[in-house]
Amino acid sequence: MELDKTVLAIITSNQSKVAGGAPIFICDEGEELELFAANLEAIIDGIAHRLSDEVYIIVKH
């Protein structure tokens, strides 16, 4: 099964801002948040999108 148009992961520094069925990664602010987003983007073959200073999502288009 191949996933299309789905959220693969959520990366956040504020757990109260997110919920749902995708894996959620909690990080410290700033550099760690950006590093997790960049690494997960490559590992799970998705695209990282910054939704706010505290939330990134990795999606498959």
Image (cartoon, rainbow, N blue to C red):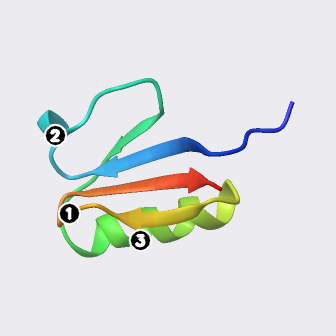
Dot 2 surroundings within 10 Å: few (below 14), some, or many (20 or more)? few
Asked which secondary structure carries label 1, the reply is loop
Locate residue 34: give its quadrant. bottom left
Are the two marked residues, 1 and 2, in contact with CB atoms closer than 8 angstroms? yes
Answer left or right for 44 relative to 31. right
Q: Is residue 10 above or below residue 28?
A: above
Give the Cα distance between marks 1 and 2. Answer: 10 Å
Kindly give the residue lying farthest to the bottom in the view shown.
31
Q: Which residue is mark 2?
A: 17
The picture places residue 17, in percent across and down from the top left corner, at: 16, 40
- For badge 1, the amino acid type reads Ser
Asked which secondary structure carries label 2, the reply is helix
Query: Which mark sits nearer the N-terminus, 1 or 2?
Result: 2
Dot 1 surroundings within 10 Å: few (below 14), some, or many (20 or more)? few
The picture places residue 8, in percent across and down from the top left corner, at: 56, 43
Give the Cα distance between marks 3 and 1. Answer: 15 Å
Dot 3 surroundings within 10 Å: few (below 14), some, or many (20 or more)? few
Q: Is residue 6 above or below residue 56?
A: above
Q: Which residue is mark 1?
A: 52
Q: Which residue is mark 3?
A: 35
Question: Of circles 3 and 1, which is in front?
Answer: 1
Camera-side residue of 20 and 61 = 61
**Of the numbered discs in the image, which one, if any, rests on residue 6?**
none
- For badge 2, the amino acid type reads Lys
Locate residue 61: give its quadrant. bottom right
